[in-house]
Image (spheres, grey):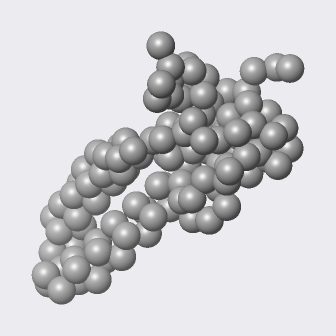
Amino acid sequence: MTQVSPFKAGLLCRCPRCGEGKLFKGYLKLAPACTACGLDLAFADSGDGPAIFVIFLVAPLIIALAMVVGAVFNPPPYVHLFLWIPATLILSLALLPPFKATMVALQYRHDAHEGHQ
């Protein structure tokens, strides 16, 4: 079996072993096992890692965009609220599943799970 790239599997939210089965059975809830290859996903625990990476990506991006918009267009403060609060929420919610899937795939690739020596 060829090895699946953890980044490709993560971006597509697919099984880290076969790259075919769906990783999630809900928004961020992992499936108990892969429907394609049967990989037991009980080992996967990404913790808060994906949220931290999303914050480190989204926050500077939103701040930079807000500064550019403020400098170029000089909108009133409420316009910034209408622009950046939804943008922050949408980007954060959109990026969480692929970041979590990537963390799970990297855990699988490096055999890093609790109880493993």
In the rendered image, the vertical position of residue 58 relative to residue 40, given as above or below: below
Give the side of residue 110 with respect to residue 2, left or right: left
Q: Quadrant of residue 19?
A: top right
Q: Residue at x 40, y 61 (%)?
A: 92
Q: Left of 102 or right of it: where is 50?
A: left
- Does 71 sit above or below residue 56? below
- The picture places residue 105, in percent across and down from the top left corner, at 60, 34
Q: Quadrant of residue 40?
A: top right
Q: In x, y percent, where is residue 97?
A: 54, 54
Residue 57 in view (yes/no): no
**Which residue sits at x=68%, y=34%?**
16
Q: Nearer the viewer, residue 106 or 38?
A: 38
- Residue situated in front as seen by the camera: 31 or 102: 31
Q: What residue lies at 46% left-to-right and 29% top-to-bottom?
A: 114
Q: Is residue 28 above or below residue 4?
A: below
Q: Is residue 35 above or below residue 62?
A: above
Image coords of residue 96 (percent x, y): 47, 55
The residue at the point 60 percent across, 53 percent down is 30
Q: Is residue 38 left or right of residue 91?
A: right
